[in-house]
Image (spheres, rainbow, N blue to C red):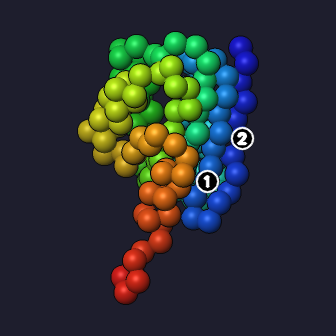
Amino acid sequence: MRYDFRVTPKCGYLHAVIVGDNTPETVQRYLRQIHESCASAKCPNILVEENLEGAGLDLGDIFGVVAEASRSVWPVVQRIAYVDLNHHHDLKNMRFAETVAVNRSVNVRVFPDVPAAEAWLQQQVTPPPGKP
């Protein structure tokens, strides 16, 4: 199984890049590594840039992976900006994953590209002028 996970610190968040095979096990593995990376860096904000090869996960697998991961997220990981670079994966399934996570109080947003995800994270971690 091909797999690579890299994390780069940015201003106010971590940027994780994941490549490999698209399986529930791969997703579970990188979600654990995201949790560990945020805990180690004491940074609760992360941009997840995923480019996994293969067919998208089915809705049952998505629900199971997200439901399991959401149990251990808070307070270590407080904001997740998520980008799936594999254009063969159905955006509706990514929105389903977002909904499952949000319904479990995980602050996650799915974005079509990295610049949009970065903009959202920057807005979240940098308060507007005049606000603490």
Residue drawn where x is 52% and y is 12% of the image: 55
Above or below for 96 versus 123: above
**Percent x, y for residue 70?**
40, 37
- Image quarter in which the C terminus is found: bottom left
Q: Quadrant of residue 108?
A: top left
Residue drawn where x is 71% and y is 24% of the image: 3
Amino acid type, label 1 = Leu
Above or below for 56 versus 9: above
Q: Is residue 129 left or right of residue 41?
A: left
- Whole-angstrom CA distance, mark 2 to mark 1, is 10 Å
Crowd tier of the residue under label 1, counting other residues whose Cα lies within 10 Å: few below 14, some 14–19, many 20 or above? many
Residue drawn where x is 44% and y is 57% of the image: 120
Is residue 69 visible in the rendered structure shown here?
yes
- Taking the view exactly as shown, the residue that stands out farthest to the left is 103
- Image quarter in which the N terminus is found: top right
Q: Quadrant of residue 29?
A: top right
Q: Which residue is mark 2?
A: 6
Which of the two discs, 2 and 1, labels the residue nearer the N terminus?
Answer: 2
**Percent x, y for residue 45?**
52, 55
Q: Secondary structure at mark 2?
A: strand
Q: Which residue is mark 1?
A: 14
Numbered badge on residue 106: none
Amino acid type, label 2 = Arg
Q: Is residue 100 left or right of residue 38?
A: left
Q: Nearer the viewer, residue 101 or 82?
A: 82
Q: Secondary structure at mark 1?
A: strand
